[in-house]
Image (spheres, rainbow, N blue to C red):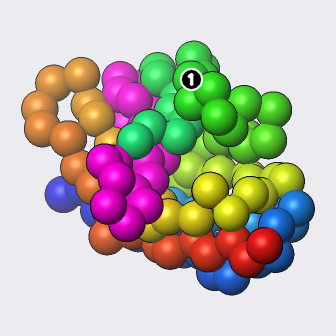
Amino acid sequence: QVQLVESGGGLVQAGGSLRLSCAASGIAFSTSAIGWYRQAPGKQRELVAQIANDRNTNYADVVKGRFTISTDNAKKAVYLQMNSLKPEDAAVYYCNYRPWFGREYWGSGTPVTVSS
């Protein structure tokens, strides 16, 4: 059974950094896409960063150069290192797992607040 549990969100000043973690179980990195989405109040959920087949990364243009996604296969974990945070990065961040066969899964989210 797939489970995704996010952690690492919190309050940070603009320009600061946070590292989000997603502890995953029941997943297979090599035959899926796994990554991070975010949703700010009143806005649609949007892709932030994703790794496909455990090697191909994809980033939203607005986070390129500031955010880095990585995985730890042994720990079945996905990380999002967020640097140079901006107030517009504030949102609830969700871990997402999309196997090539079957349904996709979501974590419950971790909130990120960026003060200006």
The answer to whether residue 59 is left or right of residue 4 is right
The correct choice, above or below, for 78 with respect to 15 in the image is: above
- Identify the residue shown where x is 44% and y is 38%: 47
Q: Nearer the viewer, residue 109 or 72?
A: 109
Q: Nearer the viewer, residue 29 or 94?
A: 94
16 in magenta: no
Range drawn in magenta: 28-45
Measured as percent of width and height from the top left, residue 109 is found at: 39, 68
- Identify the residue shown where x is 23% and y is 49%: 105
39 in magenta: yes
Q: Which residue is mark 1?
A: 58
The correct choice, above or below, for 87 with respect to 103 in the image is: below
Q: Nearer the viewer, residue 106 or 83?
A: 83
The correct choice, above or below, for 21 with respect to 28 in the image is: below
Which amino acid does the dot numbered 1 rest on?
A: Asn
Q: Residue most toward the left?
A: 102
The correct choice, above or below, for 36 with respect to 55 in the image is: below
